[in-house]
Image (cartoon, grey):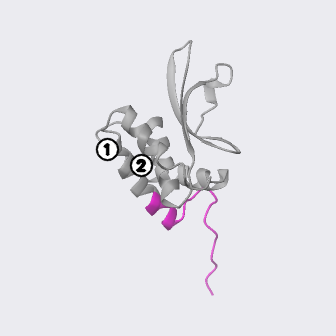
């Protein structure tokens, strides 16, 4: 008899990875557009019901899991957070896309906001120098 071991909790399921891969492809395609057009795409999704934080965390993990290391272009917080928002929309829900900045050292960051709190908002060295939200696209 074979013993089945459960998958680790942080390992995304195949459907989550598939949705994340499509969301990432859409994010990279939309990323070629000016910022105002990316904002318009996210704003068009606001009529969907709000997503719970758990769903967004799973999809964010899946997007990070399917992000290729061989990609010649930039895939950082802006692309990953946009991919998470688009993947969430592909599941029939919406999440807000937030862009922020901080000083000393100057840095910009993008993350996903839910009603229950932010996702992808790296605390790390930002605990004593938090990011200030500059734009939140519902």
* Callout 2 touching callout 1 (CB < 8 Å): yes
Q: Secondary structure at mark 1?
A: loop
Q: Which residue position is annotated with label 1?
A: 71
Mark number displayed over residue 129: none
Q: Quadrant of residue 93?
A: bottom right
Point out residue 22 in the picture as x, y percentages from the top left corner.
39, 57
Queried whether the magenta region covers residue 15, the answer comes back as yes
Q: Which residue position is annotated with label 2?
A: 67
- Which residue is painted at 64% across and 79% down in the image? 3
Q: Quadrant of residue 112?
A: top right
Q: Residue furthest top?
A: 104
Point out residue 89 in the picture as x, y percentages from the top left corner.
50, 55
Point out residue 29 in the picture as x, y percentages from the top left corner.
32, 46
Choose between 97 and 1: the one closer to the eye. 97
Do we see residue 75 in this rendering? no
Choose between 77 and 8: the one closer to the eye. 77
Q: Residues within 10 Å of mark 2 (few under 14, many from 20)?
A: some
Queried whether the magenta region covers residue 116, the answer comes back as no
Q: Quadrant of residue 129?
A: top right
Q: Residues within 10 Å of mark 1 (few under 14, many from 20)?
A: few
- Which residue is painted at 50% across and 48% down in the image? 85
Choose between 10 and 56: the one closer to the eye. 56
Point out residue 109 in the picture as x, y percentages from the top left corner.
51, 29
**Residue 127 shown left or right of residue 48 in the figure:** right
Do we see residue 1 in this rendering? yes
Give the magenta part as a residue range: 1-19
Q: Secondary structure at mark 2?
A: loop
- Which residue is painted at 56% across and 14% down in the image? 103
User: Marks 2 and 1, Cα distance to the nearest angstrom?
Assistant: 8 Å
Q: Main secondary structure of the magenta part?
A: loop
| In the depicted structure, whether residue 125 falls above or below residue 120 | above
């Amino acid at each position: 008899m074979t013993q089945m071991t459960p998958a680790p909790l942080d390992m995304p399921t195949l459907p989550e990875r598939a949705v994340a891969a499509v969301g990432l492809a859409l994010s990279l395609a939309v990323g070629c557009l000016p910022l105002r057009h990316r904002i318009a795409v996210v704003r068009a999704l606001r009529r969907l019901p709000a997503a719970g934080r758990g769903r967004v965390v799973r999809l964010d993990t899946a997007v990070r899991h399917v992000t290729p290391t061989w990609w010649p272009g930039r895939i950082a917080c802006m692309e990953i957070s946009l991919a998470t928002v688009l993947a969430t929309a592909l599941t029939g829900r919406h999440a807000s896309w937030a862009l922020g900045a901080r000083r000393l050292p100057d840095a910009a960051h993008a993350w996903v906001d839910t009603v229950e709190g932010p996702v992808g908002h790296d605390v790390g060295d930002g605990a004593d120098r938090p990011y200030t939200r500059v734009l939140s696209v519902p």
